[in-house]
Image: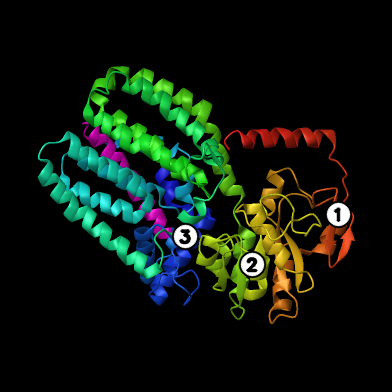
Amino acid sequence: MASLLLLLTPKLFLPAEDAAILFQFSRNLAVHGAITFIPMGPRAEGATDFAWMVLISLGMKLHIDPMWLVAVLNVASILLLADLLIRIAGRKPKLLSLFFVVGTIALMPQIVAAIGGFSSLPFAYLLIAFVYFFLQRNDAAMALAGLVLCLFRPDGVVFVVPLLIAGLVIYPARLRRLALYTALFVVPGLCYFVWRWHYFGQMLPLPFLVKASAPRIWHLFVETSLKQWKLLGLFSLVVLVYAMRGRLADARNRAVLLCIVVLPNLFYLAMRLDQNVGHRFFIYLPIGTALLIAMNWTELRPKAPTLLRLSVLLWVMLIARIWFTEGKYAYVLQYDNRRAIAQEMANLPPGKLILSEAGLVTYYSHWAVYDPWGLNTADYAKRLFKPSDVEQIKPDLILVYTGGDIDCFRHADWDVPYTTRTWKHMTRNVLAGADLANYQLWLLPAGNTRYRSWKHEPGWEGDQECWLVRKNGVDEAQLTSILARHGGLPAQDYLAHSPGPGPGGNGLEIDGAKQPVDNEKRTGLRLVKHWVGEAWRSLDE
């Protein structure tokens, strides 16, 4: 069932925003032979998954739709991953055991990321293959698998380097092993690093620069990352404490636990994990837990019924909420509007865009896009986007999603230009730069109308996206016509229908005129439903 769902992904789901960004890089590589976000534009390293990007690009060269290619790779990866885990457990793979392991993997929330076009399952397979070669003492294969893992995702280095060091410590013939690691991992890895540094002109990928900037607890951990980690972390902690009790005398158990579970935690909790669809960055937690259980399966087999019951209970208590919420969210919040608008824009002469949501609209419109958050535009990775950048770019269209609050209207109390990197500061700087004397503001439902219904906001309330069309631009009439066809309303018309789209108290400025804000409250029943829904959704934040 899980494999069938993965295979039918292109028929059921759109790519996630960040996955569509990687598809954009892959297409530019396939068509133009350069790693760029803007076709024929400056080189940019927004697609950090280098080998994944190259793989998708090769598929595009063969005229294979990326989502269909991803679907096939996902099915192959989950089957190969299950096969490896069974072999590590010392068992001969059989159809029933293969189905059981595949089904168990599918119950982890990272399956949602795989459905959205991310490389989660291929990455998990490569990680398990790397550890498998470590356990088999196949040094050459381990070094090469580690190199491929790091090329697939640069954060693979936080798994590979510690385990390579562990191999040098716990296994004999250290000099031979060190020579193999150096020849097959260190030297090729350094060559790739020097090449990409020369190619892009900077040491770190753009997302690393952006995600490293965040408020921290004890100057170490990002609060939002801790909140996202806590349920999966607790699940893995309890299962591992039960399963590994008395088994840490084995050096290999200690090495895998430290290098695949413990140390990566320190890295990911110190990073801002934007677009963490399905908690995809934490896939090492369930995979590492399954790996350690497989490594000790012979000894654990008498305890298997109790371990299974414990895992099911913890899944129901901790993971089911994430799994159902992320799955429903992935279905409900598909950005049908963005894709439909972008596909119609592709029929117009290409223009320039500023997009806070730089995935689907970029990929399907074929327009030149500037990413103010800085994940794909180098200038804004090093500093926060400024209001003056809007006038410098002179985009024909701007899309800003403020994150759920209808904050499309400039307020008198905004302290622009902001310089501290937060999403709200960035969106306010963009909106402040898009002077309504030069731009016409339209509001559209965020994603699609299903999303508003899911949030119990069937009317004019609910999440909205801010679209700004440049007045007297070449495509103004066509663009406003496209927005209107997809549920968009000019700001004045939106206010006429809405009971109160913005934060109360300050009023809203539109074309220089202050508009009153209606603070009419919801009925008691709707308010209770709203609170219950928000509480449920916040449990896995």
| Mark 2 neighbour density, 10 Å: few (under 14) some (14–19) many (20 or more) | many
Q: Is residue 55 above or below residue 218?
A: below
Of the image marks 2 and 1, the number of the one nearer the N terminus: 2
> 356 or 427, which lies in front?
427
Q: Amino acid at mark 1?
A: Gly
Give the residue pinned by disc 3: 206
**Secondary structure found at label 1:** loop
Question: Within the magenta stretch, is there residue 293?
Answer: no
Residue shown at the point (45%, 44%) measured from the top left: 281
Mark 3–mark 1 CB contact (< 8 Å): no
Q: CA distance from mark 3 to mark 2?
A: 28 Å
Of the image marks 3 and 1, the number of the one nearer the N terminus: 3
Q: Position of residue 363 (x, y in %)?
A: 52, 67
Give the residue pinned by disc 1: 507
Residue 175 found in image quarter: top left
Question: Within the magenta stretch, is there residue 90?
Answer: yes
Q: Is residue 77 visible?
A: yes
Residue shown at the point (72%, 50%) measured from the top left: 405
Q: How many numbered marks does the figure carry?
A: 3
Q: Where's the C terminus, which quadrant?
A: top right
Q: Nearer the viewer, mark 2 or mark 1?
A: 1
Q: Over which residues does the magenta segment extend? A: 68-92
Q: What colouring method underlies this structural image?
A: rainbow
Give the residue pinned by disc 2: 341
Mark 2–mark 1 CB contact (< 8 Å): no
Residue 351 found in image quarter: bottom right
Residue 416 found in image quarter: bottom right
